[in-house]
Amino acid sequence: MAHASDGRSLEFKLPDLGEGLTEAEIVRWLVEVGDVVAVDQPVVEVETAKAMVEVPCPYGGVVTARFGEEGTELPVGAPLVTVAVGEGDTAADGPGRGAGTGTGTGGAGAQEAGTPAAEKKAEGSGNVLVGYGTSEAPARRRRVRAGRPAVTGASGRANGWARAAEKEADAPVRAAEPVDGPVLVISPLVRRLAGQHDLDLRELTGSGPDGLILRADVEYALRAAAAQGGRAADQGPGTDREPDAASVASSASSASSGFSSPSPAPGSDGTRVPLKGVRGAVADKLSRSRREIPDATCWVDADATELMRARTAMNASGGPRISLLALLARICTAALARFPELNATVDTEAREIVRLDRVHLGFAAQTDRGLVVPVVRDAHARDAEGLSAEFARLTEAARAGRLTPGELTGGTFTLNNYGVFGVDGSTPIINHPEAAMLGVGRIVPKPWVHEGELAARQVVQLSLTFDHRVCDGGTAGGFLRYVADCVEQPAVLLRTL
């Protein structure tokens, strides 16, 4: 994570932020060159595909350099800042070591009087992000077998991509002879992308540090293969031409840019919008869901008048307010207890359905940065009051961009209240790798036959989109009907409490 660039200066690199994230965009610098920083003081705010994160520096001293302007996207392992430290703090065997006691005074090389350097070295910074700031020297997260160089980079949209693009333009086919030993790939996204297209990573030459294979390398190889296949089909059998220089240069430019900035669409008056960050992560996940999951949707209208009255009565009795979303979540967990087939995932490699014992309930939340799905852990073990509090906390964090990667992953079932947008129905895309999603439309007065007479009632449309591999229509219909019964007659829910 960091190393001594000279006897008195330490270089702090963008840490691994977890959950397979390989890059982050600099949103706001929190320090200037020349500022004095304490151990664990946040120095930069970055945005990943998951959330906004303030990154603390594990060194105390004077900032001597910053790397990257606001808006720049950096790969994990790229330098962030260099910090000049005192004579006793230059040893940096690992993240969070030699950085001070974790309560730095803010002075350059500040050190408590009488504290031996060896003891100080062993303490660590205290503030933990993935990969640094631990109390003891951490084991390296990534091990490379003997004979291969260790690498710290992870993805490439930062400095050095222009050089990679030039290399790509000079080399029509981005491939090399297969090599023995481990493949230099860090990102699980890169491995997954290659696996989805049956691409052998050993045949690629990486453009990253020390030959690291980046996502752009895989995407370029796939485009080159598709282009060659298309030309072969157009030219007929027996013709096999290399791609012309112009098309290769265009592909290389596209790969190196990583959709990093808006640009006019060729031959039109439109504008290209970068598909990155939260929007890019959502696009990738939804595309994968559509590719892999054979989904189906069923829906039903329900009279929610009694549910709304029950909520009003609960909130009139004092205490924390109960949200409608919390009541719907409580109904969902009760329904999943009756129909566990829908709290599941499909292991495609093993050809097995994995039914899950715990309900981690995701809910769709629209923010200024796009759609996110925070996850309420162990929703089945929470009552309506506890669910209301957790929904409120996660929603506030989502709007502020402060959700952690752990709060955005691991869901087993999703509740989507699209009624807040003023619509009645939808056929949502399942949040891969889950097996189902319950959609809730707006609740509005409508004519309804109630107890044999026409009346104005509060009506809602409920929809269930489910993975047809995990169950058939009978199970899905039974789940949705139980949810509708609980909405219409909340007393039904008492049987499971």
Image (cartoon, rainbow, N blue to C red):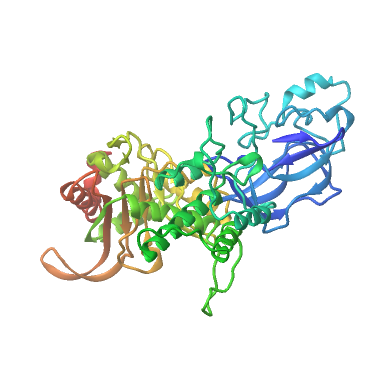
Residue at 46% x, 41% y is: 200
Residue 74: image location, x then y, percent: 65, 50
Q: State the residue in front, 105 or 412.
A: 412
Residue at 43% x, 40% y is: 377
From the viewer's perspective, tell me whether residue 226 is left or right of residue 344: right
Q: How many marks?
A: 0
Q: Quadrant of residue 8?
A: top right
Residue 249: image location, x then y, percent: 59, 62
Q: Quadrant of residue 353?
A: top left
Query: Residue lying furthest left in this view?
Result: 452
From the viewer's perspective, tell me whether residue 188 is left or right of residue 128: left
Query: Residue lying furthest bottom in this view?
Result: 269
Q: Is residue 256 visible?
A: yes
Q: State the residue in front, 207 or 186.
A: 207
Q: State the residue in front, 135 or 145.
A: 145
From the viewer's perspective, tell me whether residue 394 is left or right of residue 133: left
Residue 410: image location, x then y, percent: 43, 41
Location of the C terminus by quadrant is: top left
Residue at 46% x, 49% y is: 374
Location of the N terminus by quadrant is: top right
Above or below — where is 51 with respect to 60? Answer: below
Residue 62: image location, x then y, percent: 85, 42
